[in-house]
Image: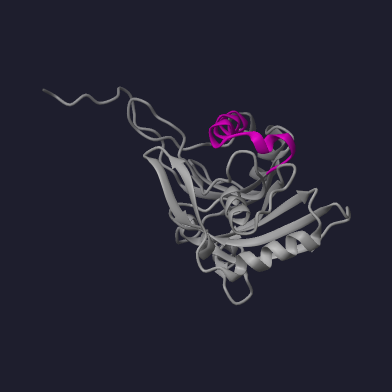
Amino acid sequence: MARRTPEGPPPPLAVQKLRIRYAKRGRLRFSSTRDFARALERALRRAGVPMAFSAGFHPHPKISYANAAPTGTASEAEYFEISVTERVDPEAVRVALDEALPPDLDVLEVVQAGPGSLAERLEASVWRLEMRGVTVETLAYAVERFLEVEVAEVTRMFKTGAKTFDVRSAVVSMVATESEDASCAILQMVVRHTTPSVRPDDILTALHAVTELKPPVPPLVTRLAQGPLLTAAAGVADPLAADKEAVGS
């Protein structure tokens, strides 16, 4: 039997790849990656971005998402890549796409992709948790006890069933700090990206198991950054730095 092929000419080839950082804020922290993908495709069309499409009977935009934050968490450092069929000015795309997206989905940076994989650069995340109803003294004590243990296991349900895994080894640093509200403490931590991924709620579960800390209300969780892990400084670097250097060279 002859192999079926789509009628008509093949889609235009991609001539440029863009890497984009965006923020997910406010109520839109409850949007899923799928929700964002739908909003993004509409915004790309409204902004007139010349998207590249895959071949075949069901072509789709050549967009890839990298390590999206869990639904319900805010983020200042979400990333995706898109291929385009015409060379474009990254800053012009940033402005047009930001205007086309709903408020609280904010496009922060657009750069031309250089060599290398963006996904491989996303080695760790910096998380900030606003712990309302918890004093900084209580949180500091819990952090001290948690950092003293070598293993802190949690169990989470996956598509393949329940899995138990260690979260302590993924925590590079953890610190408790004061906020302007004395009844609200801030937990900031650098968490290494692992398989399975260790999410902020996993660490909260482990904190409760180790120290019995249980905030009276769910914390407001924000990813501040993600990128190459800076072990000595207990932080992360800009994952788009290499792309900016490549364009500038």
161 on left or right of 134: left
| Residue 187 position within the rendered picture, expressed as x and y whole percent measured from the top left | 72, 58
Identify the colour scheme used: one colour
Find the magenta span and give its range: 24-44
| Residue 224 position within the rendered picture, expressed as x and y whole percent measured from the top left | 68, 55
Work out whether residue 98 or residue 73 is closer to the camera in this orientation and state it: 73
Residue closest to the far front: 212
Name the quadrant of the N terminus: top left
Work out whether residue 22 or residue 70 is closer to the camera in this orientation and state it: 70
| Residue 32 position within the rendered picture, expressed as x and y whole percent measured from the top left | 58, 35
Q: Is residue 57 above or below residue 214?
A: above
| Residue at (43% x, 35% y) in the render | 53
| Residue at (58% x, 46% y) in the render | 69
Q: Is residue 7 above or below residue 76?
A: above
Dominant SS of magenta comes to helix
> Is 194 included in the stretch rendered in magenta?
no
Is residue 113 at all visible to an observer of this figure?
A: yes
